[in-house]
Amino acid sequence: MGRWQRNAKVAFIGSHGIRKTTAAHGFANAMQRAGRSVEYGREVVRDNPLGINEGATGEAQLWVIVSQIRQELTLAPKAEVLVLDRGVMDNYAYYLRACGGVDRFAIEPMVQEWSKTYDLVIRLFPDVDLSSDGVRSTSDEFRLEIESILDGHLGELLPEEALVNIPASQIGDGFDWWPIAERLAALMHEPLFADGIPKRRIVRKRRPKPPPGPQMTFGDA
């Protein structure tokens, strides 16, 4: 068997400061070790010329959503798996917050339809402290606002089988991405490993014992 018949798209979502970038790179590396071609889509909000964080306007967050879609359209045809640091779902939460809870530009139908284009979405939950990176807000209240909005809309945007939930505290060098890679391959009805990549040569990292609290869950579990 050669390439997958259809390219896949995977988004890592949630509020800011929850290790999405680390997680997205870890998953992308796992897919590459399985012999699959991978493209990576970085977080577009950092290029926003209109402002970010608590003071962002509806127009600024509209720019982010449009730029997110444009990036995905550009990168998706280039590899078997496109791994994204954010998707339209969490960017929509920031947009609604900036608009005072009102869909000022009537983009919800577009967001609903675009959400259907993701094959797998990994949501990270904010059980880690915020730390300053010089760009994103360090306000816990702001982050919780975004999480609350996402809670209220995600079920309307994604089918359960496409969603994986992981506490951010579990993300690190020892996290085992293979079960999620296998889940993606199953959703695509394709083999995980490319030709010439025997499964026996893949060494799975031993995950440390997780702390008490929420654990990784699959949407249809």
Image: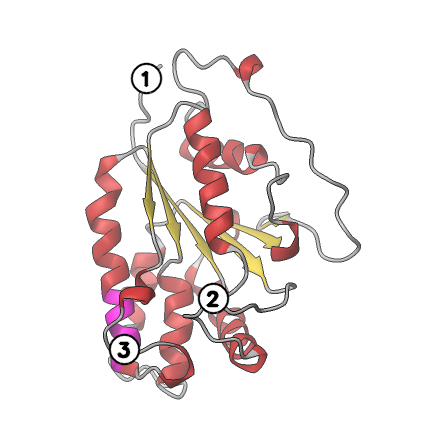
Q: Residues within 10 Å of mark 1 (few under 14, many from 20)?
A: few
Q: Quadrant of residue 38?
A: top left
Q: Main secondary structure of the magenta part?
A: helix
Q: Position of residue 33 (x, y in %)?
A: 46, 25
Q: Residue drawn 42% across and 73% down?
A: 93
Q: Secondary structure at mark 3?
A: helix
What's under tag 3, amino acid-wise?
Answer: Ala
Q: Position of residue 151 (x, y in %)?
A: 54, 70
Q: Secondary structure at mark 2?
A: loop
Q: Which residue is mark 2?
A: 133
In this view, 213 is above or below 195: below
Q: Which residue is mark 3?
A: 60
Q: Which residue is mark 1?
A: 2
In front: mark 2 or mark 1?
2
Magenta span of residues:
59-66
In front: mark 3 or mark 2?
2
Q: Position of residue 20 (x, y in %)?
A: 49, 55
First in sequence: mark 2 vs mark 1: 1
Q: Residue drawn 37% across and 70% down?
A: 92
Residues at circles 1 and 3 in contact by the CB criterion of under 8 Å: no
* Residue 155 placement, left or right of 105: right
Residue 137 or 88: which is nearer the viewer?
137
Residues at circles 3 and 2 in contact by the CB criterion of under 8 Å: no
What's under tag 2, amino acid-wise?
Answer: Asp
In this view, 117 is above or below 30: below
Q: Residues within 10 Å of mark 3 (few under 14, many from 20)?
A: some
